[in-house]
Image: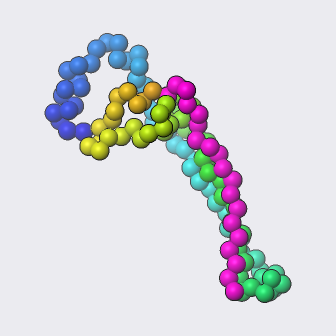
Amino acid sequence: MSAERKAMLQANLTANDALYTQRADFIKIREVSLTYTLPTEWSSRFRADRVAVTLAAHNLGFLWKPWYKGLDPEVTFNGINTTSADGGTFGWVRADYFTLPMLRRLTMAVDVSF
């Protein structure tokens, strides 16, 4: 954020602004995956050189979110990114009412090499 923008924002702060802001530091488990390569004798049953199976879980939850009271600090009410092109934030898109957390997903992949 530029010094000029920061000065403008600080000049326009009022005591009521604190009612609508909160820290949103967090640590999130975004993706965990596990891959197992089958032994060669099992792969040969499928006439393959190699078979690997991958299980992945996405958006499992938060490890640490002490101050943020909403569901997910990355999700806004209109679903767009909260950061502008110049690195600042669009103040009004920080609202997180009417939101749902990011979907938890489980995926599986099978990689077969012949």
Q: Is residue 100 magenta?
A: yes
Q: Residue at x 40, y 23 (%)?
A: 21
Q: Residue furthest front?
A: 78
Residue at horizontal 20 percent and vertical 38 percent from the top: 2
Viewer-nearest residue: 22 or 107: 107
Q: Is residue 49 above or below residue 72?
A: below
- Residue 98 visible to the viewer: yes
- The stretch in magenta equals 96-114
Q: Dividing the image into 4 quarters, which one contains the N terminus?
A: top left
Residue 51 vertical placement versus 17 (above, below): below
Does residue 48 appear to the left or right of 83 in the view shown?
A: right
Q: Position of residue 62 (x, y in %)?
A: 58, 40
Q: Nearer the viewer, residue 36 or 100?
A: 100
**Observer-nearest residue: 38 or 106?**
106
Identify the residue at image location x=35%, y=28%: 91
State the image coordinates of residue 112 (x, y, percent, origin top left): 70, 78
- Residue in front for this viewpoint, 80 or 113: 80
Q: Quadrant of residue 42?
A: bottom right
Instruction: Report the side of 39 relative to 58 (left or right).
Output: right
Magenta span contains residue 97: yes
Whether residue 40 can be seen here: no
Asked where in the image residue 22 lies, by quadrant, the reply is: top left
Image position of 77 with respect to 81: above or below: above
Q: Residue at x 20, y 21 (%)?
A: 11
Q: Give coordinates of residue 84: x percent, y percent.
A: 32, 40
Residue furthest left as drawn = 4
The quarter of the picture where the C terminus appears is: bottom right
Residue 28, image quadrant: top right
